[in-house]
Image (tube, coloured by chain):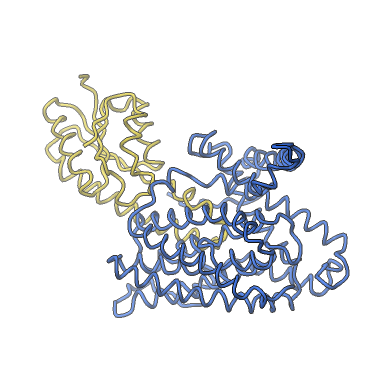
Amino acid sequence: MSVAEDIGFFGKLPKALPGLALLVGTMVVIRFWIEPWMGNAVILDQKGWLIKVTHLNYILLGIIMGLLYRNVLFGGKLPDVFADGFKLSRLFIKTGIILLGSLYTVQAIIKLGSMAIFLIGGFVVLSIVMVLWLGKLLGMDRSMTGVMANACSICGVSAAVATAPAVEAKATHVAYAIATILGFGILTMFISPFIGHALGLNDLQYGAWVGTGILNSGQVLAACLAFNPNVAPGTAVSVGEIWNIMRVISIPFAVFAVTVWYWAGKEQPEGTKKSLSTLLLEKFPVFVLGFLGMVLLTSIGAFGDAGIKGGPPASATIKMIRDWMQWIFGIGLVGMGGYIDFKELAQAGGKPLKVGLLVGATKYVLALIVVMIIRDHLVEI
Amino acid sequence: MSQGGIAVAVDGSQASDGALDYALGLARTEGRSVTGVFVLDTGWADFIGNDWQSAAGARQGFLDYIRGQLEVQAEAARAQFAGAAADVPNASFSVIPGDPLEALVSIMAAGEADVLVAGAQVFQVCGRPSLKRLARNLVKRVKQQVVII
């Protein structure tokens, strides 16, 4: 029986239409009716109280709606009629990330990227050391330690998915690791904007913090847009996503390193050995190349002025691309909300939960402290 | 008690030993047919659906890897059932794809058996976290008699 689950876009588009219509319709209702209503509603004698106090915007509302669809309206499972449409939400977000390349020039990427490497590198080392130590302390299985090391240090679920086959991790162990990391990521996605606003962080500081501290980097995008839904150079998403991309790029290298560590002193079965180049081909996320291509095009002025700080204002084309991005991310994140299954998260447990929570909380708090300490030295774009 | 067939969830681990003993004992005593069922969990793609960053190769590689483990477990379940049910005349075993809860509920809803027997921790050996509640959910959802061991 075939296990293929990714669908060809055009071939299966008709089947995806109902789900797609639900995603798009939800975002239209949120952006045209719910958000404006929240901005005008007078509660406790304050106009816009709902937005000022709850910090809810179309991104968080979209995720919450997706979450409610699955866990309340559909009783815990996406109905078949909507399932194919929801699968396309991953494509939406990847497309949005590619377009996000229009926020940067090559120089800006180099400036931000260098700072990201410094912060991420430090926290990767810290997380790996913590996982190895806790794994030993709790008597965690070696393959599970390998999966958790990459998941906690690099980018959460994506790293767990990429690492598990290379270290022969048991399905049930990986499942508990994923549930823990996803649960922690979702929690931090919702609380980070509140903390960021309460501490008066600016976009640069906030982006650097969540880009470093959120365990599952898949939630960095949503946490940034939840803090500031604007998509423009210098906003939280333009900072946090550089951190995210640096983390995603490192997946194949991290898988290679953990594989070498796992099989050290053991006889690796023939046919399972993979070189770094094979891992790069298999596990490198292609959308990153699209993002870099977009950065290059923006740098050579293919879309007109990019509206970078200190330069001329953004061209009409760039403004249009940024407007699309808000819709594309909004629609994609409704779908992502639809994949949050409380049944799975509520049952997370065991050693992965202990390790994930300890490392995740340490990383999250420590990243905030470090960003607060170096806040005046962060490089703006 | 009606004299229809018995369905027993088997996962090839100790978690199904008790259920298998009970189901086969009932089949021997009452002359009923018994079907061992292993559900090849297809819910993994959905389980990692929130991960939008993985490369297609990494995602598919992971799903294939999990599928491989489930197939090995299915063979262990088949062997466990065959070993225990060697002396039961109307015994059969089937591997069906699907969500374990929905698949077992469907079997019962289709009237393929009158009694469903399952271990309290069945399918947890290679399952997603939500399968911890499988037994409890089966009792809630299945209309016929459900025996949880």
Q: Residue furthest front?
A: A45
Reply above or below: A180 against B30: below
Reply above or below: A16 against A280: above
For the residue pair A22 and B105, the one nearer the viewer reads as A22
Q: Write the residue at 30% across / 70% down.
A: A136
For the residue pair A184 and A368, the one nearer the viewer reads as A368
Q: Write the residue at 25% across / 27% down.
A: B115
Left/right placement of residue A329 relative to residue B13 reads right
Q: Where residue A230 sits in the image (x, y, percent)?
A: 74, 56
Task: Count up the numbered dots.
Answer: 0
For the residue pair B82 and A101, the one nearer the viewer reads as A101
Left/right placement of residue B8 relative to residue A74 reads left
Confirm whether residue A255 shows in the render: yes
Q: Which chain is blue?
A: A
For the residue pair A338 and B72, the one nearer the viewer reads as A338
Q: Write the residue at 24% across / 30% down.
A: B6
Q: Residue furthest top?
A: B2
Say which quarter of the image contains residue A96.
bottom right
Say which quarter of the image contains residue A99.
bottom right
Q: Where residue A117 sits in the image (x, y, percent)?
A: 59, 77
Q: Which chain is yellow?
A: B
Q: Where residue A82 sits in the image (x, y, percent)?
A: 58, 39
Say which quarter of the image contains residue B105.
top left
Reply above or below: B137 against A250: above
Reply above or below: A316 against B79: below
Quadrant of the frame with the C terminus of chain B: top left
Confirm whether residue A32 shows in the render: no
Q: Where residue A293 sits in the image (x, y, percent)?
A: 72, 70
Left/right placement of residue A138 relative to residue B45 reads left
Quadrant of the frame with the N terminus of chain B: top left
Left/right placement of residue A305 relative to residue A5 reads right
